[in-house]
Amino acid sequence: LVSRKWRVKPSVIDLGDGVTIGEGSLALCAGPCSIESEAQMEKVMDHLVANGVRLMRGGVFKPRSSPYAFRGLGLEGLRDFHRMARARGLKIVTEVMQVSQVEEMHDFVDVFQVGARNTQNFNLLDALGGVDKPVLLKRGISGSIEELLSSAEYVFSGGNEKLILCERGIRTFETASRNTLDLNAVPILKAKSHLPVIVDPSHGIGIREYVPTMALAGVMAGADGIVYETHETPETAASDGAQTLDFDESARLIRNLRRVYALR
Ligand code: PEP
Ligand code: MN
């Protein structure tokens, strides 16, 4: 069902209020790795609004490699995130980690993110197949393109056709970068599937100074959008500071992404 053989026309996901993801426009989504506080959100939101970005990312349930790392503000943080975003006309994307969270999060999210550690959590995919909110499905840490499409098939066949695919880098033998951003996946996914494809250069390369370059490369590879991490003070971010842009870097990237998209 997610194949171009089944549907030739590219799918465009409509989030309402003029925010869409898919062919015909460049979708920009930015925000911190983790939602930390109202003060932090306010600063990020001001930055996004000032730069015309309508979609904000931010995790409240964080999948961390260590149980001692910051694991997010949870549902309470999500309510604040949602309320503050609504007041500013922003849509929000946030990660859901398990089936039981789908219902409790439902009314407070615009897009459910399935993280790379849950791409093959088939029960979660089944549950998301039954909701009426879009799903941003990340490629698994060691997942093939075919496996990503199979995971998308779970959600789509469950009845939820509002799906966005995300290339976020895969684990390879390379240690010079956090992950290996597989830009090959972009034209391949675009050819195989009618679903929108976005690129996450932050997790893809994991090194702040190279994130803009790979974001721009993602757009030239044919991505329908870019999702990246930004924070007022990346050095103090609760998670993923080393791959997070400050607001100056973020503003410059937004300008350059729009320029490069216009060249396509
Ligand atoms: C994130 O978006 O902050 C995240 C945890 O991403 P991924 O699942 O791609 O590692
Ligand atoms: Mn992150």
Image (tube, helix red, strand yellow):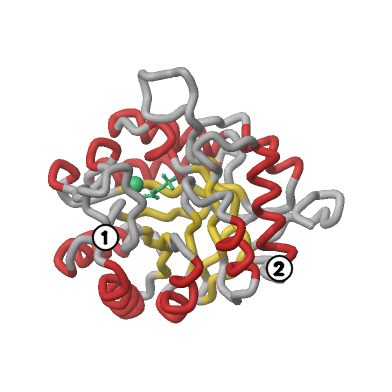
Residue at (58%, 49%) from the top-left corner? Answer: 120
**Residue receiving disc 2:** 158
Residue toward you, 161 or 121: 121
In which quadrant will I find the C terminus?
A: top right
Instruction: Please identify the quarter of the rendering in which residue 191 is found.
Output: top right
In the rendered structure, which amino acid carries the disc numbered 2?
Gly
Instruction: Please identify the quarter of the rendering in which residue 200 is found.
Output: top left
Residue at (45%, 54%) from the top-left corner? Answer: 28
Residue at (48%, 40%) from the top-left corner? Answer: 168
Residue toward you, 259 or 18: 18
**Which mark sits nearer the N-terminus, 1 or 2?**
1
Vertical position of residue 116 compared to residue 21: above or below: above
The percent position of residue 73, horizontal first and vertical second, equals 24, 65
The percent position of residue 169, horizontal first and vertical second, equals 49, 35
Q: CA distance from mark 1 to mark 2?
A: 29 Å
Question: Which element carries disc 2, helix, strand or loop?
Answer: loop
**Residue receiving disc 1:** 72
Vertical position of residue 114 compared to residue 254: above or below: below
Question: Which element carries disc 1, helix, strand or loop?
Answer: loop
Q: How many marks?
A: 2
In the rendered structure, which amino acid carries the disc numbered 1?
Gly
Vertical position of residue 191 compared to residue 8: above or below: above
